[in-house]
């Protein structure tokens, strides 16, 4: 028995998060809040805050107002007036989330100040990083992570550009990816809680919806998937009934506009953004909206996505762990190849990274520290002379390919002809 196994021998394998994981997370969150106090921008959190104020003041029909040229700027007199009379510390970005979340924020703005809310967000972000690491470890190893390993992971996570960017902007990405990791890890042992987590994060960030669908396909996660569908449906129905059809369709139209355009900025490492830098005509614009992308920028991302998803599916069909490979692989691919790949999205790399360590049986595990270099300064830091604009994409795509190689090179990999189109076997 390994030292790690002996260390965890008393812990039941059916428990994803233990009470002391939450304690470590809260302590780390307090440290994060203390270190970062007064040093951050909170532009993204400000967007949620203003959305809450708009709903509170009966102006929910003005939620979705984005400048036609700069994706980082809201527009409209109601937005500007609300900002002017608010206590936000930095000029906020536009609001693009589901109406349901704005209603939740309308409750938050009633009970606390903006300054208090950003402290709580910093604490929650630190806690979420711990939940992300612990849950991702459990997903692949089906055991508790050793405390020393967890502390090392927290240190690396703290130093990563993805986490630092999320903190600086007041992003909810740590919470989103923690919910994704927990939802996958707990799908079999705590399906209801897992489903609620996946349903909520899918309502806030739409990409996790693919995980809900994958959960429904595999028997081991089907209950969690159905609960997630129900949770997401509640959020959508609430948005339609309470916010009104006009507000809901305004949100949906906004999403379609975002999907059709390309956002070009240093912090957007997507393929489409990188291929559209020549379309930026005004360098003073923070996030340029390209409404007429080139054919190359429009076609290459979906082709890359389809190729990588095909690789993931083939790998899953040959794997003894098809559920994990499919869920983590496809989710990471869709995150990497979307038109928007903010640098804080790289936090989700924890999922395939630990998959490589768990499933790798040869030298493929040495790719982990190599790819990891692209997650830290100077390569991942936009204001560094050594900054590599493709670093976010390299990390996510690199870990997906490494995960597939690790799985396909295992001694227990199944010949493709032996895998039936039934997800019951080894699922």
Image (tube, helix red, strand yellow):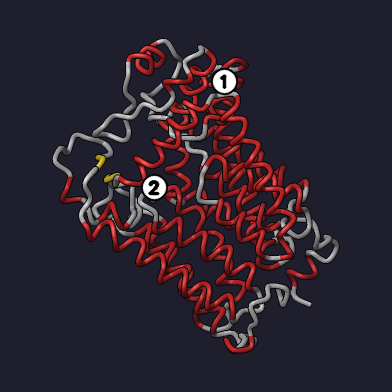
State the residue at coordinates (31%, 58%): 271
- Is residue 240 or residue 225 the one in the foreground? 240
- Is residue 389 or residue 214 the one in the foreground? 214
State the residue at coordinates (56%, 49%): 177
For the question of whether residue 30 can be seen, the reply is: no
State the residue at coordinates (43%, 70%): 308
Give percent across and percent down for residue 420. 65, 82
Q: Residue 359 shows which numbered tag?
A: none
State the residue at coordinates (70%, 49%): 195
Read off the residue under disc 1.
Answer: 106
Read off the residue under disc 2.
Answer: 342
Disc 2: CA contacts within 10 A as few (<14), some (14-19) or many (>=20) = many
Establish if 395 lies above or below 279: below
Give percent across and percent down for residue 252. 45, 37
**What SS does tag 2 mark?**
loop
Give percent across and percent down for residue 235. 62, 35
Front position among marks 2 and 1 = 1
Quadrant of the image containing the N terminus:
bottom right
Contact, CB < 8 Å: mark 2 with mark 1? no
Among numbered discs 2 and 1, the one appearing first in the sequence: 1
Disc 1: CA contacts within 10 A as few (<14), some (14-19) or many (>=20) = many
- Measure the C-alpha gap from mark 2 to mark 1: 26 Å
Determine whether, in the image, residue 57 is placed left or right of residue 415.
Answer: left
Q: Could you say which quadrant of the image residue 304 lies in?
A: bottom left
């Amino acid at each position: 028995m390994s030292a790690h196994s002996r260390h965890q021998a008393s812990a039941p394998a059916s428990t994803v998060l233990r009470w002391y994981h939450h304690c470590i997370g809260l302590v780390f969150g307090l440290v994060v809040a203390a270190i970062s106090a007064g040093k951050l921008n909170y532009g993204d959190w400000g967007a949620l805050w203003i959305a809450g104020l708009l709903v509170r003041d009966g102006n929910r029909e003005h939620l979705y107002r984005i400048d036609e040229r700069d994706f980082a700027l809201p527009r409209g007199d109601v937005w500007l007036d609300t900002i002017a009379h608010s206590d936000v510390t930095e000029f906020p970005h536009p609001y693009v989330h589901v109406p349901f979340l704005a209603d939740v924020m309308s409750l938050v703005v009633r009970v606390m100040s903006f300054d208090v809310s950003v402290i709580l967000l910093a604490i929650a972000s630190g806690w979420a990083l711990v939940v992300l690491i612990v849950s991702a470890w459990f997903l692949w190893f089906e055991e508790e992570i050793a405390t020393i390993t967890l502390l090392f992971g927290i240190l690396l996570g703290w130093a990563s550009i993805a986490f630092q960017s999320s903190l600086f902007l007041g992003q909810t990405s740590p919470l989103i990816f923690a919910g994704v990791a927990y939802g996958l890890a707990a799908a079999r042992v705590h399906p209801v809680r897992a489903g609620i987590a996946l349903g909520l994060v899918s309502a806030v960030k739409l990409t996790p919806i693919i995980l809900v669908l994958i959960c429904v396909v595999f028997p081991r996660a089907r209950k969690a998937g159905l609960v997630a569908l129900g949770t997401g449906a509640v959020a959508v129905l609430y948005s339609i009934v309470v916010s009104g059809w006009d507000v809901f369709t305004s949100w949906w139209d906004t999403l379609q506009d975002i999907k059709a355009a390309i956002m070009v900025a240093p912090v957007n490492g997507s393929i489409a953004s990188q291929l559209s830098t020549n379309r930026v005509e005004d360098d003073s614009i923070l996030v340029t909206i390209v409404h007429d992308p080139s054919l190359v920028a429009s076609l290459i991302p979906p082709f890359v996505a389809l190729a990588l998803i095909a690789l993931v599916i083939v790998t899953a069909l040959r794997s003894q762990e098809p559920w994990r490979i499919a869920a983590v692989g496809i989710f990471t691919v869709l995150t990497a190849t979307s038109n928007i790949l903010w640098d804080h999205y790289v936090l989700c790399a924890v999922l395939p990274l630990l998959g490589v360590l768990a499933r790798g049986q040869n030298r493929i595990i040495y790719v982990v520290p190599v790819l990891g270099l692209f997650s830290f300064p100077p390569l991942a830091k936009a204001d560094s002379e050594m900054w590599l604009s493709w670093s976010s994409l390299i990390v996510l795509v690199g870990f997906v390919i490494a995960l597939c190689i690790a799985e396909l090179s295992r001694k227990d990999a199944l010949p493709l002809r032996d895998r039936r189109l039934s997800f019951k076997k080894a699922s």
